[in-house]
Every structure is written in structure tokens, then in C-alpha cells.
Amino acid sequence: MLSAGLPQGAVPKLERPGPLRERVYEALLELITTRSLRPGQHLVESELAGHLGVSRQPVREALQRLNTEGWVDLRPAQGAFVHEPTEEEADQLLSVRTLLEAEAARLAAANAGSAQIAALEELCARGEQAVMADDVDLTVAVNAQFHAKIMELAGNLVLAELAGRVDRRVRWYYTPVARQRGKQSWIEHRELIAAISARDEQRATEVMRAHTEHTRTTYHEREA
């Protein structure tokens, strides 16, 4: 049952502006990304509609879109299920992420000023606090913000657009290993900030490449 599978307060409130089908889509995608709806979980239209306070039609439309994008599997005579990513799917995406993030780190080292570096340090401090509090959801969210900030500092719109396309899936894959990565991930973030602050493009590239590869390796070695 969906009601048994979602933690208290997990269902996001739907904002009123904008097409209903778009808001339902975003709400379901967020629940999948954060793994409130887990890989392999059966998605019942009527239950989802009840939790979101909408009719079944926008839920059906959202599930069809999510199926097209690879987040949901629609099985004949069985219904909708959250997609279960294969190891190969994860590996391919996380490998591409490494390429994008390493280039972003290099450009950030070339472009960042003191205010931007201070913003990175603030995000890093928030992430460290989230790890100390064992708040996985907050850790994942701040981690995404930190990497998005690096991408912003890179100043390359095409790179940012490409990174934006994989960001949600990166969060999806990072969530189950966030606790395992723990403090070490933020130690690596500190090393990255130091390289960017020193305007050392080569070092920033190397640190980011190693950092993202550590996450990829941890995902494949994750606990069941």
C-alpha cells in the first residue's frame, strides 16, 4: 500500500499555479527521486490521487510521462511500478556526470571570486551539519546544491543545461549511498573548495573527478 510506503510528511503539497498535470508530475518525480517511492514499488493511481488530493486523470498523465522518461515502468495487465535501475544504467549516468562535473570544477577554478568561494564554504558547512545530524534527506539536498553552485560558477550555459538533465538521476543514485559516503564526501568538498580558491584548474579537475568516481564506486558497492 502506498500509505504504508510513504513516511509521514513525505507527500509534497501541490502548488496551485500552473497546469495540474505538471504539478502532479513534479510531485511524483520528487517522491521517486528522494526514494519515498522506492524502486520496484507498485503505483496505484487511486492511492496516488488520494494522497495528492487530485483526480486520477492527472496522475495517469503524469505516470505516462514518467514512463516515457524512464522513471516508471508501465506493465500490461499489472500497472505502474517505479523503475528499478540496472547497474549498467547507473554506471553510464554516473560516468557522464564525472565528465560534466570535472569540467565544471576546472571552469569554476578559473572564474570564482571570494564571494562565490564563501558561498561554497557555507554550503559545505551545512552539509557537514546534516551529516552530523544523520539527516540523509538534507544531506542529499545540500549536496545537490553544492554541485549546482559549482556548475553555476563554471559559467557555461551548455554545460549547465546538460548537467541539469542528469541532476535528478544523480540525486536518485546518491540517496542510498549518502550515509555511506558520510563525512568523507564533505572532506572531498573541502579539498575542492581549496583548489578553486587557489585557482588551480588542474587540481580542481582532479579532485572533482576523484570525488565523483568515489560516489560511483560506492553506489556499486552499496549495502543491499
Image (tube, helix red, strand yellow):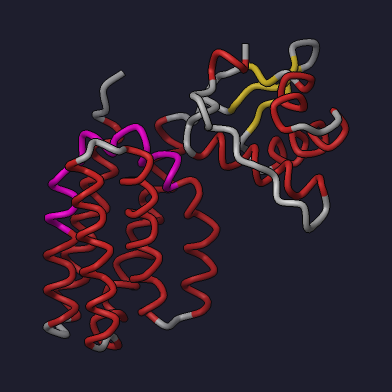
Q: Is residue 22 magenta?
A: no
Q: Can you say which quadrant of the picture contains the N terminus?
A: top right
Main SS of residues in magenta: helix
Residue 103, horizontal then vertical, whole percent: 33, 72
Q: Quadrant of residue 191?
A: bottom left
Horizontal relation, residue 220 to residue 19: left or right: left
Residue 221, horizontal then vertical, whole percent: 24, 29
Q: Can you say which quadrant of the picture contains the C terminus?
A: top left
Front residue of this view, candidates 54 and 22:
54
Residue at x 20%, y 60% (from the top left corner): 125
Residue 169, horizontal then vertical, whole percent: 48, 45
Vertical placement of residue 194 versus 48, above or below: below
Give the magenta range. 170-188
Horizontal relation, residue 49 to residue 189: left or right: right
Residue at x 18%, y 56% (from the top left corner): 210
Vertical placement of residue 95 versus 55, above or below: below
Front residue of this view, candidates 67 and 20:
20
Residue 24, horizontal then vertical, whole percent: 73, 41
Horizontal relation, residue 173 to residue 112: left or right: right
Vertical placement of residue 197 versus 83, above or below: below
Residue at x 51%, y 39% (from the top left corner): 33
Q: Quadrant of residue 41?
A: top right
Residue at x 70%, y 45% (from the top left corner): 14
Vertical placement of residue 103 versus 8, above or below: below
Q: Is residue 184 magenta?
A: yes
